[in-house]
Amino acid sequence: MDELLKSALLGTAKHPPPPSLSSILESVELPADHDVEGRFLLHAGTLATYQAAGKAALADLDVPEGAPPERCPVCNDRAGRILDEFLSRSVSDRDLLLEAFTLLGERELVLPPELLPSMLRVRDRELRRQLALVGGERGRWLAAKNPDWAWLLNESTARASEDADDEETKRLWDEGSPAARRTLLARVRRNDPAKARTWLEEGIAKEKADQRVALLEVLHVGLSDEDLPFLQSLANDRSSNVRAKLLSLLVRLPSSELSQRMRQRATEIISFEPAPKKGMVAGALGKLAGRGAPKGRLGIDLPEKIPKEWFTEGMSNHPPTGVGVRAFALTQLLSLVPPTVWSERLGASAEELLLAAGETEYSFDLVHGWAQAAISFREPSWLEACWNMLLFRDHGRPPTPHELRTTGELLGGLLEAMPTESVESKARALIGDPRLVPLAEKALKHLPTPWSESLAKAVLGAGREHAATMSPVKLERGGGAVEETWPSLLVLAAHRVPASCFDEVLRRWQLPNADHYRLRILGRAIDQLTEIVRLRKGFHEAIADRSSTDNETNGSKE
């Protein structure tokens, strides 16, 4: 067939078919008056028909052992059809699949066998972790047949290690896949920090750089001074990513030399002069005039050239676009020092220092660094002060793309670090003020899924009000950032609203009867919101119906 293909591509004049192609074609009698091209076409058709007819079956083959019986019921047909619809969307929806796998795991159900080949192609790490729980015995059986699916066996092995004895656990650590070993190390670290550290001491030098970073991340749990000798032994690691990870660990240990050096560098750079106290009358007049509270003066004495050792010890010398090396170094340095150091050393509150920072040329860099430190060290007073500063400060100019992007990320990080009772009110404040809606989307992405019922209702209520009050006249007046944000925010809400809000989402939405491209965009977002929630609602209802799964075990119905 290869020779015929060459003739077809090059032409019979340049590549005539050889006189003898195969025993099959030699047995075919062709009319003598056919030219070369005619004989070629007849030969090609004959050979294609012969190959399509099949081949003789191979004999004496070993039949592979079948999949073992399932230990858990297979989800019912309705749930299976909805899962298939999740997969058939134009882009497989990670959030829909993750929720579905989680719900199946909670109810001790497994996936239908016919969906397993498609499901085993997922690449997202969290999806794979959940799929290891709901793939069932047949999923593990299939994974053993295809090297591309071996990750499922690794995930299952890591989970099985929780019930293994010490000898078996150590064997899994020595022989497991990178993902399975990280999962195993995290479990051991929670239960026996010293054992986990010993394992790392014995083998981390053999690991690749990205795996060293991943394994060191586990040490954030149970970090103590007992880890210091091991961490300091890695100080000269060749990888900048490993050194950065070491830095993030060592600065959390006040007794480490690196932590002390960072504090000394930072405090040598920054000074503070408190604002003069004003009399009661002058202070009142200042507030009435809109000048607010008097601000202190913050002094910044950065080196003209950042010393090389700052970077060799783990800080990055590759700033984002639009940010200078010195400003980026300042932000990183502040993020590595517990924010309480500044309150104690400079004798000022977080609010006073942040207000003073706003008057310097490094305004955003200072606030950025202190906000990162507040997030890392979970300092309540600084979390609150940084939130207010980022949310309400007027820069006197439009924010740069870097500032806008970073502000949203920081607000989300601050929300994650705040006590739970503070998060809801903060998120509702964002969505309740139309001016803050562009930041709301960025911050709300960082909240746990699903949102609380009260937050979800606040988002849906604000979204309905926005949709109902849109008009071409209003759109032409401006406010583009808000109009650009709402469509993506509603799609985000589609995956985050709790089951108790499904019916609220599916209630009819009101949109003005007008032709404007932003109205069309919002209309499509509302359609997507309701479509996703309808799918989610259907899946919740399907798996809640256990009547059709009680008899479905071993992948079939009785």
Image (tube, grey):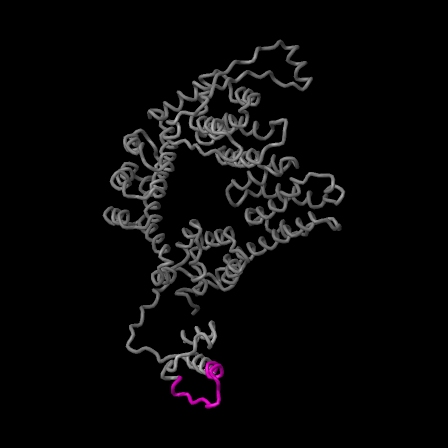
x then y, percent, for residue 313: 36, 30
- Toward the top, the furthest residue is 279
Q: Quadrant of the N terminus?
A: bottom left
The correct choice, above or below, for 97 with respect to 67 in the image is above
- What residue is at 45 percent from the left and 89 percent from the top? 30
Q: Total marks drawn?
A: 0
Name above or below for residue 224 compared with residue 558: above
The residue sitting at the left extreme is 167
Residue at 27% across / 36% down in the picture? 194
Q: Position of residue 504 (x, y in %)?
A: 63, 49
As drawn, 339 above or below 116 = above
Taking the view exactly as shown, the residue that stands out farthest to the front is 13
Residue 488 among magenta residues: no
- Image quarter hosting the C terminus: bottom left
Q: Is residue 141 left or right of residue 285?
A: left
Residue 233 vertical position relative to residue 133 in the rendered view, above or below: above
User: Percent position (x, y) of residue 398?
Assistant: 63, 31
Q: Quadrant of residue 396?
A: top right
Q: Nearer the viewer, residue 398 or 45?
A: 45
Q: Is residue 211 left or right of residue 374?
A: left
**Is residue 34 on the magenta stretch?**
yes
Q: Quadrant of residue 68?
A: bottom left
Magenta stretch, residue numbers: 25-41
The x and y percentages for residue 272 are 50, 16
